[in-house]
Amino acid sequence: MEILSVSAEVAPWSKTGGLGDVAAALPKALAARGHRVLAVAPRYAPYPDAWDTGMRLRFPLFGQVHEVRLFHTQAAGFDLLFVDHPAICRGGIYGDERGGYGDNLFRFALLSRAAIEAARRFPVSAGGDAARPLTEAGPLRVLSHDWHAGLVPVYLRHHYQAHGLLTDARVAHVIHNLAHQGVASFDDWWGLDLPAAAAPVLDMHGRMNCMKAALVSADRVVAVSPSYAREITEQEHGFGLDGILRMRGGALSGIINGIDPTEWSPAADRHLPATFGPEVWPEAPTKPGPVGGKLRCKAELQRELGLPVRADLPVLGFIGRLTGQKGIDLLEAVGPWLAHQPCQVVLLGTGEERYERALSALGRRYPSAVAVKVGFDVGLAHRITAGADILLMPSRFEPCGLNQLYALAYGTVPLVHATGGLRDTVHSFDPGRDAGTGWAFGPASPEAFQHALSMALLTWHQFPASFAGLARRGMAERNDWAASAEAYVRLLAG
Ligand code: GLC
């Protein structure tokens, strides 16, 4: 198949969360299955490893003809193009310290228009055969990710197909997070250069809504886990679009994300002081906690973060954006209680200032129990994943979640709120049958969270063999892209 993937982020060039990881790993997995894949993302900064193709695209937007330049890099098995324009290339991805950029609608409209044109014009070389544009090689299959690429199916229908072009193209719109919808005032409608027939497609209660436009225009809609696909058709998690999603019921499905073992494998992770395999959780432990390489990672992590180096306490990690979605309020609520338990807590993330302040205060108050790093640090994220015993994900909602999958692979037992992809990937401990891979609590309340935490701490301290079993079963799971990439292939082919 000829597959175009369009996203606002692609790791490692641009990433604020899981979207960037998936937008790199899914094209790679599809290309590995013999498909020709072109991924298109914005050029937010002058990336040293991407070269100017010399190709220029021009189109009218917001009352002016704009020219974008295309930069190219050969990614793992697929071609990756970066769309360059002064409005895009100004440092931040979605905004700066002052907040989101005011012209994001324009910036991502540029991305969407440029991506479709690139599929028609840019000679894709991956796959070995002669370089030619995707649309010359066969019918175009498009993956548009989140609201930022939401105008792709809209331009495709109303700009191209309405004029008899690309009529055999099909789009699957992938929802990574329904909370962000790309809402703008209809005052900007004229700038999008769309025919009047597209206005009702974008309209949501009198405002333009890019996510809604994608949901009604795409041929198929994919959510990044089966549970999330169900939850977003209900009011609680639908963010106002549950009615539209119920309407699209037949076209909506859930496909869980995978992880890329070349980036995330404890046996070959260049960010770690020591690598390791399942031997770090012995079947008949003589005392609680991991041994070998994982113990070394734990000790180094404690040292790096200024905590007492203690093998006799479990380290509880949290990595993520500090936003309401991630359940930071629950962490805040149980924080003081947790700081008095026999454990250490390490937190890494950036986000809303009030959460950054609250968590930092917790760290200052309990310096020997809680270490807080405000920031975005890929290396430290790997070291926490490896060095922690337990990974906390109290997310209020979580479309898929990747950190729990990384944790499972690294023998770090996830403790999660049972929602979305967390519900689908973490199997709650059943002591009677010695089954499960973590703890999944509900509802999302401080009480339920605290109860799960005390169960986990009790298990770590008093039942080391049970804890090691949880960790070993997690490590044995395969959460790579194989099955999910096949599911995307079937969806795009159908
Ligand atoms: C978003 C979601 C997260 C998901 C990721 C990749 O960041 O919040 O749950 O794992 O996208 O799909």
Image (cartoon, helix red, strand yellow):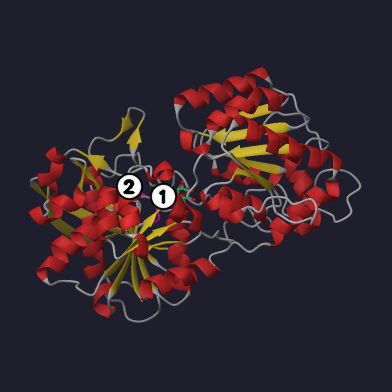
**Residue under circle 1?**
232
10 Å crowding of disc 1: few (<14), some (14-19), many (20+): many
Mostly what secondary structure, the magenta segment?
loop
Residue range highlighted in magenta:
42-49
Q: Quadrant of residue 161?
A: bottom left
Front position in the image: 241 or 350 = 241
Q: Secondary structure at mark 1?
A: loop
Q: Are marks 1 and 2 in contact (CB under 8 Å)?
A: yes
Viewer-proximal residue among 428 and 375 = 428
| Closer to us: 431 or 410 | 431
Instruction: Work out whether mark 1 precedes mark 2 in sequence or the reverse, and give the earlier one.
Output: 1
Q: Quadrant of residue 170?
A: bottom left
Q: Is mark 2 within 8 Å of ligand 1?
A: no
Q: Furthest residue to the bottom?
A: 129
Report if residue 410 lies within the magenta region.
Answer: no
Q: Amino acid at mark 2?
A: Leu
Q: Is the shortest distance between ligand 1 and the CB of mark 1 under 8 Å? A: no
Please report the residue visible at 19 percent of the width from the left and 59 percent of the height from the top.
Answer: 155
Residue 47 on the magenta segment: yes
Which element carries disc 2, helix, strand or loop? loop
Judging by the rendered image, the residue that carries numbered circle 2 is 241
Q: Amino acid at mark 1?
A: Ile
Label 1, label 2: how far apart the Cα atoms are: 8 Å
- Residue 417 against residue 228 in the figure, above or below: above
Asked if one can make out residue 6 in the rendered structure from this viewpoint, the answer is no
- Picture coordinates of residue 415 (x, y %)? 65, 43
* Residue 224 visible in the current orientation: yes
In the image, is 185 to the left or to the right of 304?
A: left
Q: Quadrant of the N terminus?
A: bottom left
